[in-house]
Image (tube, rainbow, N blue to C red):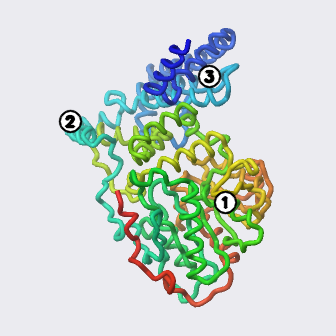
Amino acid sequence: MADKTDNTKLWVNTFDPFGIVPACSAVVEAWGRHPEKLHQRLQEFYADLFKVQQQVLKRAVGNSAPDCCVVAPVVYDERFQDKAWTESPWFDFLKEYYLLCTRAIEDAVFATPGVPEKTRRQAAFWARQVLNAMAPGNFLWTNPAALNRFIATGGMSLAQGYKQWLADLRKGDISMVDEDAYKIGKDIACTSGEIVFRNELLEVIQYVPVTREVHNIPVVIIAPWINKYYILDLAPDKSLIRHLVNQGFTVFVTSWKNPGPEMCNTSFDDYLIQGAHAIIDTAREICGVPGVHAVGYCIGGTLLTALMAWVAQDKKATPPVDHWTLLTTLIDFSNPGDIDAFITEDSIRWLEQRMEENGFLDGRDMGSSFRWLRPNGLIWRYVVQSYLYGDAPPPMDVLQWNVDCTRLPKAMHSFYLRKFYLENRLVEPDALVLDGRSIDLRRIHAPLYVVGTEQDHIAPWKETFKIAGLVPAPVRYTLATSGHIIGILSAPIDPPKRRYWSGDATGLQDPEAWRAKTEKVLGSWWGDWVKWLSVCCGPMIPARRPGSDRHPPLAPAPGNYVLEK
């Protein structure tokens, strides 16, 4: 019996660390135990299939295309935007048959009787990967745009696509972007500033003011260390950092070191104390203020929240943060979205064994995981464009940042996955101990501004909203349209393209009820945030040059750490 168990564990660790087979098998077996419910679902499927076939027959005898499809793609599904998917009876049938089968399978998985919700979510995630890969647009003979391109170019589009496929095969990844189009420090990460602090974990950038006066309280940004800080300082027209500087704020940001094997034992505590705490102390000393406004983005926001609870434990000390902002940040990890499919005891153990080899998780592995959360937009789209259309990867600053991956130290990443994702300790009072202190979110009283994004696949907005009911502090919540990255990079433009909802959420627990009573505003949420910040960050004073006697400028921004590969 012991040998059988050991062999099973060996098989799981080697071939199925993410539990694909057990999850899918549980769903299949459950439906086998409920034949009457399965029969009912099949009846519904065949009824819809009959409607699709009727539509095809009507068009085959000369009827015009219907005003609406039997099974219509969602509005933001880019796979079926070509007019041939509607105008051609053949391609219209392919589209609707594919969508009908896809939705029937996914709906059946989610409705599986007698199976735990997590198992259903896992099975649905992996089923979706197969279904997305089988989309008709991913193949030459069932992609009308690819066929038209093939005919128009005399086959050269496919020849060029073959060359690009060979290049990607050698590279070991699907190319998304021209990686040489933008230069760090010249085209992106080019807001003027100075490195005013450096340790083995981070460089602190303070930006040069462009206004004669600035708000008294500085803004300190704790960027994520999954990828690099310059997502907040892309091209000048998209740079959130440049926007804050232009609005009269003194801005600091973390530029994290890209870890190597020597940092394998770097812990979450180190990121807390030598990272977040260090940059806040640096900004306080340089600006001569007792407290700052702290901003945390994604995992940087999770770190900031932990720090807020950590410093709140010491009731005698002066709080180093007067008020704070969270951008697309998970605090409650009970339902973290599609990434939950990767989070099991077996998968974490497998990942720990893999990190044991080098002492870190390679950034490309993390990047691949995130791409599989949205495979249509981040994988198959580029397969089609590069290999079927023969298009060269385009220049795009956001995508160039996306492929500029960073490594994650073994000790930190293992702790983060276990204590936050697997065990959800951050929301439990005194259940998480960091640098010798147990932390409790109920001790945080500083005013908070929170931003979630409507289509976020990494930090679902309804989960980010939960912080409003977890801290006894004034909370203003903003929901921006778009996703985890583009929803944050919502620079004001004319005419405006984005929208947002913003309003008081103090103590609230129902995100949909909050949205229902909150006005939807046309434009960028940056304006609402700056207005809120301007009140919080105090009166205007003469602008400060970067650095101080204790923290003299060490080098021009963007510094050295951001350039490390």
Q: Is residue 541 above or below residue 393?
A: below
Quadrant of the rendering where the C terminus is positioned: bottom left
Q: Which of marks 3 and 1 is in front?
A: 1
Q: Is residue 523 above or below residue 72?
A: below
Q: Distance between the residues labelled 2 and 1?
A: 51 Å
> In this rendering, would 195 be left or right of 283?
left
Q: Which amino acid does label 3 sit on?
A: Ala
The residue singled out by tag 3 in the image is 108
- Frontmost residue, 390 versus 199: 199
The picture places residue 381, in percent across and down from the top left corner, at 40, 41
**Looking at the image, is mark 3 or mark 1 earlier in the sequence?**
3
Query: Which residue is located at x 63 percent, y 72 percent?
Result: 530
Query: Which residue is located at x 67 percent, y 70 percent?
Result: 321
Does residue 64 appear anywhere in the picture?
Answer: no
Query: Which residue is located at x 51 percent, y 48 percent?
Result: 411
- Frontmost residue, 86 versus 542: 542
**Looking at the image, is mark 2 or mark 1 earlier in the sequence?**
2
The picture places residue 118, in percent across and down from the top left corner, at 64, 30
The residue singled out by tag 2 in the image is 155
